[in-house]
């Protein structure tokens, strides 16, 4: 279809810290013709000063910019209610007092501090 639109997903694994920017996409049309499409996404109009309004200044659009942070700890938590030995959902009433265990687990690659 000439006006067909499709959603694509990009999956990648960053190898080091820093900023990742997506500028466009390249592909081969029907496996033959190479196509290069640059994304031109403008930010919101700035309106704080007279100069910004007159010149039509825009902020930088950050939707295609990703910051890759260094490895860190990632603390997960699991609560187990004593009366429930299985991992089923527990229903409690407001004000009800129960005995429970809280497990904190470091799922990250760095030590918690």
Image (tube, helix red, strand yellow):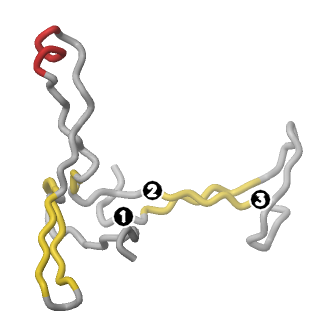
Q: Is residue 37 left or right of residue 82?
A: left
Residue highlighted by disc 3:
81
Residue highlighted by disc 2:
75
Residue highlighted by disc 1:
108
Determine the residue located farthest toward the top in the rendered image: 50
Name the one closer to the observer, 27 or 95. Answer: 27
Residue 77 spot, x, y in % from top left: 56, 57
Secondary structure under tag 2 reads strand
Q: Residue at x 18, y 56 (%)?
A: 39
Quadrant of the rendering where the N terminus is positioned: bottom left
Name the one closer to the observer, 14 or 95. Answer: 14
Residue 89 spot, x, y in % from top left: 78, 63
Residue 102 spot, x, y in % from top left: 63, 55
- Sequence-wise, the earlier of marks 1 and 3 is 3
- For label 2, count other residues whose C-alpha is less than 10 Å away and answer few (under 14), some (14-19) or many (20+): few
Q: Residue at x 18, y 10 (%)?
A: 49
Q: Is residue 13 left or right of residue 76?
A: left
Secondary structure under tag 3 reads strand
Secondary structure under tag 1 reads loop
Q: Are marks 1 and 2 in contact (CB under 8 Å)?
A: yes
Q: CA distance from mark 3 to mark 2?
A: 20 Å
Name the one closer to the observer, 36 or 20. Answer: 36
């Amino acid at each position: 279809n000439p006006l067909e639109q499709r959603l694509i997903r990009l999956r990648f694994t960053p190898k080091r810290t820093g900023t990742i920017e997506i500028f466009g996409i390249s592909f081969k049309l029907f496996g033959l013709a190479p196509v290069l499409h640059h994304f031109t996404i403008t930010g919101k109009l700035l309106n704080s000063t007279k100069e910004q309004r007159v010149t039509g200044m825009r902020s930088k659009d950050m939707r295609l910019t990703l910051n890759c942070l260094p490895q860190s700890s990632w603390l997960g938590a699991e609560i187990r209610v004593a009366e429930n030995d299985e991992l089923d959902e527990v229903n409690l009433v407001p004000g009800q007092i129960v005995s429970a265990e809280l497990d904190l687990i470091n799922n990250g690659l760095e030590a918690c501090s």
